[in-house]
């Protein structure tokens, strides 16, 4: 163990450079992707926001990988006037590939199939089932601090 720390100390500049290059590369890729494809959601104002919770947790039911590779205190969940916007915190959008854990969605309220309380690993969660633009059905499990306010904002 001591040898590893000694190697890291000797090569700190190289290690730091590699980490910095990683972050800069993903930030550039993210900026390019947004420029080419545009954002995943149309612009909205604060007046459109009915509910917002930062540092939420959750995972997608898309695959075994996404079920175990969710986000812990790294999501922003917004209920807008006519949609639900779920996205990772900004830093995670920069360092992770697009669609990595299937946790970046803009869902029109008309596409929501069902929202129901659930329990996962002894923690209260909300199941959000919706139909994507391609017709596929997605399920996200969100651990929110204010689940009742989330449901009320969806109904309002």
Image (spheres, grey):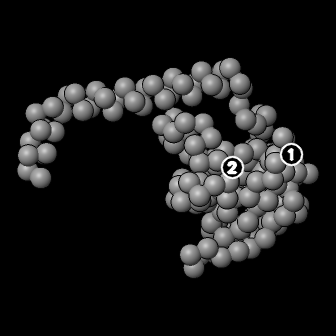
Q: Residues within 10 Å of mark 1 (few under 14, many from 20)?
A: few
Q: Nearer the viewer, mark 2 or mark 1?
A: 1
In the rendering, at what x and y percent does residue 106 appear? 76, 44
The quadrant in which the C terminus is found is: bottom right
In this figure, which residue is indicated by the disc labeled 1? Answer: 135
Residue at 15% of width from left, 31% of height from top? Answer: 11
In the rendering, at what x and y percent does residue 109 appear? 87, 52
Question: With respect to residue 59, does 32 lie above or below?
Answer: above
Question: With respect to residue 47, does 20 lie above or below?
Answer: above
* SS of the residue under disc 1: loop
In this figure, which residue is indicated by the disc labeled 2? Answer: 86
**Outermost residue toward the right?**
110
Considering depth in this image, is 42 or 29 the residue closer to the camera? 29
Residue 118 sits in quarter: bottom right
Question: With respect to residue 40, does 105 lie above or below?
Answer: below
Q: Is residue 40 left or right of residue 96?
A: right
Q: Is residue 130 left or right of residue 61?
A: right
In the rendering, at what x and y percent does residue 144 appear? 64, 65
In the rendering, at what x and y percent does residue 108 appear? 85, 47
Q: Residues within 10 Å of mark 2 (few under 14, many from 20)?
A: many
**Outermost residue toward the front?**
64
* SS of the residue under disc 2: strand
Q: Earlier in the sequence, mark 2 or mark 1?
A: 2
Q: Is residue 126 left or right of residue 112?
A: left
Residue at 88% of width from left, 51% of height from top? Answer: 111
């Amino acid at each position: 163990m001591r040898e590893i720390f000694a190697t890291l100390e000797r090569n700190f500049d190289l290690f730091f450079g590699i980490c910095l290059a990683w972050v800069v590369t993903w930030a550039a890729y993210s900026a390019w992707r947004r420029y080419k494809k545009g954002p995943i959601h149309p612009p909205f104002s604060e007046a459109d926001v009915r509910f917002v919770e930062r540092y939420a947790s959750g995972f997608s039911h898309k695959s075994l990988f996404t079920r175990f590779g969710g986000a812990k205190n790294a999501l922003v969940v917004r209920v807008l006037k006519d949609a639900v916007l779920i996205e990772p915190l900004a830093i995670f959008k920069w360092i992770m590939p697009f669609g990595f854990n299937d946790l970046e969605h803009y869902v029109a309220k008309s596409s929501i199939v069902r929202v129901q309380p659930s329990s996962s690993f002894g923690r209260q969660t909300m199941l959000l089932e919706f139909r994507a633009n391609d017709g596929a059905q997605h399920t996200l499990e969100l651990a929110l601090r204010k689940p009742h306010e989330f449901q009320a904002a969806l109904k309002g």
